[in-house]
Amino acid sequence: MSDYIQLGNLDVYKMAVELSRDAWRIYERLDWRDKKILGDQFIESTDSVGANIAEGYGRYHYKDRIKFYYNSRGSLLESQHWILLLYERKKISKEEFMSLLGKQKMVHSKLNSYISSCYRSITTINKSEK
């Protein structure tokens, strides 16, 4: 039996999807002006985290995969910027802010670990080819 993990069972992807769900709940209640000014970019950057993980996961070559995982990490950091602005502009509560930051931190850590494991896989493959 293969060790292949389906995308939907990949922990870092599941965490990113959960983060998107939380972000959507915030986005939905913003008025049209707030959505236009910062909400659209907030939801796009947050959704991009999981989307880039999914796209990278579908790539064959490890280096190609890692490039998308780095894009995912960049989107995660961008979403942190937007959540900070949402909080500073009093569009979300302190509890929501802290919850989202906590989840973003967990995704960030898991994504870094996943990127590291991809690099270790490259090293393992290169050693076995020699």
Image (cartoon, grey):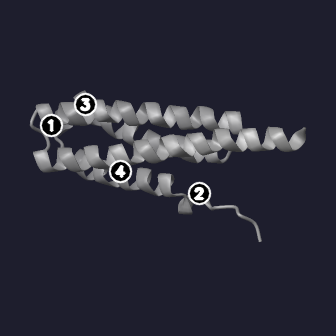
Decide which of tag 1 and tag 2 comes sooner along the chain: 2
Circle number at residue 125:
none
Residue under the point 81% across and 38% down: 126
Compared to 128, does 63 lie above or below? Answer: above
Decide which of tag 3 and tag 4 comes sooner along the chain: 4
The count of marks equals 4
Specify the amino acid type for callout 1.
Tyr
What residue sits right under mark 2 in the picture? 7
What residue sits right under mark 3 in the picture? 38
Query: Callout 4: 10 Å neighbours few (<14), some, many (20+)?
Result: many
Along the horizontal axis of the image, is 48 left or right of 57? Answer: left
Q: Position of residue 63 (x, y in %)?
A: 69, 33
Judged from the image, the secondary structure of the residue bearing numbered disc 4 is helix
Alpha carbon separation for disc pair 3 and 4: 17 Å
Alpha carbon separation for disc pair 3 and 2: 30 Å
Looking at the image, the residue that sits furthest to the right is: 130
Circle number at residue 19:
4
Which quadrant does the C terminus fall into? top right
Alpha carbon separation for disc pair 4 and 2: 16 Å
Judged from the image, the secondary structure of the residue bearing numbered disc 3 is helix
Residue under the point 23% across and 28% down: 37
Along the line of sight, the residue nearer the viewer: 110 or 92: 110
Judged from the image, the secondary structure of the residue bearing numbered disc 1 is helix
Decide which of tag 1 and tag 4 comes sooner along the chain: 4
What residue sits right under mark 1 in the picture? 87
Q: Position of residue 112 (x, y in %)?
A: 49, 40
Specify the amino acid type for callout 4.
Leu
Q: Position of residue 113 (x, y in %)?
A: 52, 45
Alpha carbon separation for disc pair 1 and 2: 32 Å
Specify the amino acid type for callout 2.
Leu
